[in-house]
Every structure is written in C-alpha cells, then in structure tokens.
Image (spheres, grey):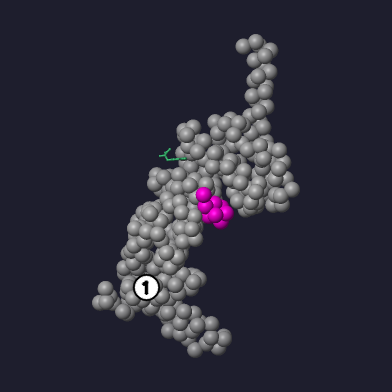
Amino acid sequence: MSNFPQQPHCLAPAFGGGAAPPPLPSAAGGGQPVRDRKIASAEQLVLDLCEPDLRENALGELSKREIFQDLAPLLWNAYGTIAALLQEIVSIYPFLSPPTLSPGASNRVCNALALLQCVASHPDTRILFLNAHIPLYLYPFLNTTSKTKPFEYLRLTSLGVIGALVKVDDTEVISFLLQTEIIPLCLRTMEMGSELSKTVATFIVQKILLDDVGLRYICATAERFYAVGQVLGSMVTSLAEQPSTRLLKHIIRCYLRLSEHPRACGSLNNCLPNMLKDGSFNNYIDDPTTRHWLQQLLHNVGGINRVANLQGGLDHIIGS
Ligand code: TRP
C-alpha cells in the first residue's frame, strides 16, 4: 500500500481532465485561493484514505462536511478509494452478531458511510454507485436489532445512504432496491429504530410506494401488503405516546399512496388505524400538506366504504 502514487495525477479526471487552474492573485478578497487550498487538501485526504495509518484521520476530516461540490467524483475516480471504504465496512461485520461493536468502530464506519452517501447523492456517480451494487454492503447493518448507540447510529447512517439514492425519483434505483429486498429491512427499522431512523426508513418506503413499480410490488401479495400495513399501524399507535409530526407525515403519505391501489384501498377499509379516522391527531397536525393528505386518504378509503354500503344496500334490495 505504501507505494501508492503520492501525486494526485490519478485525480485529474475528476476535474474535467485538465490540471486545476493556478490560483490567481485575487483582487476579490482571496476566495479562489482559499477554495483551491481546500480542494488540494481534500485531494490529499482522499489519497490518505488508501494509507491504513492515515485513513482514520482522513475519514474524519472528509466526512465533516461536504468540503467542495465535486468530492463525489473525486472519491469515485481516485484509485483504490472506494475499495478502501468497502474494506472499512466489511471490517466490522464480525462485530454485528453477536453485537459487540464499539462506539469508536461504529463512528469510523459511519464516517466511511457519509462519504458513500456523498457518492450516492451526486448525479455523476449515483448510477455508477448503484451498478457496482454498493448498497448491498450496507444491508447487514440494516439487519441488526441491537438498540445501543453504535448500532442505532450505524443503521441511521446506512439508511441515509439509501435515502440519498431514493431522493431523486429514478425507477432504476427503486427496481434495484426491490430486487435486493430492501423492504423487509426498512420494516425492521420502522419497528425497532429510533424516531429518526424510523423516519428515514418510512421515507424510503414512501419513495418506493410512490413509484408505480414499487406500489405494484408491495400490493402484489396479501402478505406483503399486511406486513407493511401492520408496521405502519403500530407506528401510528406508538405516535400517540411519542408524537413526531415528521414521522406521522411520512406514514400518512404511505397510507395515501396505498389507497390509490384498488385492492389495497379495499383492505385499508379494515386495517387503517382508528386513530387516523377519529381525529385523534387533528390538533396535532399543523402542516397543511399533511392535513390534506389525511383528508384525501379518508376520502379514498371512505369512497370504498360508500361503494360497499351501496353494494350491501342493493344486495338487501335484490335479496342476494
Ligand atoms: N421475499 C419477501 C417477499 O417478496 C420479501 C418481503 C418480506 C417483503 N416482507 C415483505 C416484501 C413486505 C414486501 C413487503 O414477499
């Protein structure tokens, strides 16, 4: 490893194939040289990721904030960087079960995940990231059930990477996630995670449902539909004790989307939590969008009710 090139020549393609322009002696307050210095130091830190002794510091520094806009292509194109990040990830697999992950090790991997999130968010690297099947490396973290901080932090950061992928509506992303069975993993976090990781997991399910392929997938079998419905329902129940308007918003959006599927809408008639129907949350939803979604949901589900009642009434009249 120590004979890796120290000159950032391997990074040049990230900047359009040319060398970075020399810093101009600037009359305008020195912004450009500062920026150039930042880029140069980020380049050095990216190279440091490949040096085992320097990696921990580089992970910490690079993940602190998005140092500059095009960190993602730099990470992706620099020789050995993604391999180094994956190595970080797999190195803690042995501590997942039985759960023995230390806070320090969790923090270090979360820094590596933050850099992957940057790659997953960037338009030029998102599809490359997906085609390399990198999300799969995160799935073991979503499969954990320990509620301790190191595991909770690991689940939340991993969900952040998936959340960054689904944020841009792209059916290719959704298909990948469905094929690799992300839904049961999200459901698991929705059942046992912290409020924040529940919210991110529900956001991911919401984005999947909003995709036509995703809605069809979840409504394809009764088992799938009820698995999702049951977890949404138990989250609603627990919101009565521990309110979270942002979580409620995503839950309602999921139900509303399910109500747009004819068969699912029929089932929601029975399994939509009463608390959503009886106004329990009325004083509590201040966001007009959420209010509107809830009204629409009740309208959709109530519409089925009316059809069922009408049907019942007709049955009565016709005597069948
Ligand atoms: N293999 C399971 C299936 O396709 C995956 C799964 C488990 C699932 N629980 C789910 C999919 C809930 C959708 C919803 O059914």
Residue at 52 percent of width and 43 percent of height: 209
- In magenta segment, residue 197: yes
Residue 22 versus residue 114: which sits nearer the camera? 114
Judged by its main secondary structure, the magenta piece is helix
Above or below 257: residue 39: below
Above or below 223: residue 34: below
**Residue 171 at least partly seen:** no
Residue at 39 percent of width and 72 percent of height: 56
Q: Is residue 226 left or right of residue 311?
A: left
**Image coordinates for residue 68, horizontal then vertical, percent:** 48, 72
Q: Is residue 216 left or right of residue 276?
A: left
Rendered image quadrant of residue 7: bottom left
Which image quadrant shows ligand 1?
top left
**Image coordinates for residue 174, horizontal then vertical, percent:** 45, 47
**Image coordinates for residue 5, horizontal then vertical, percent:** 28, 77
Query: How many neighbours does mark 1 have within 10 angstroms: few (below 14), some (14-19), or many (20 or more)?
Result: many
Question: Residues in magenta?
Answer: 192-199
- In magenta segment, residue 194: yes
- Toward the right, the furthest residue is 283
Residue behind mark 1: 55
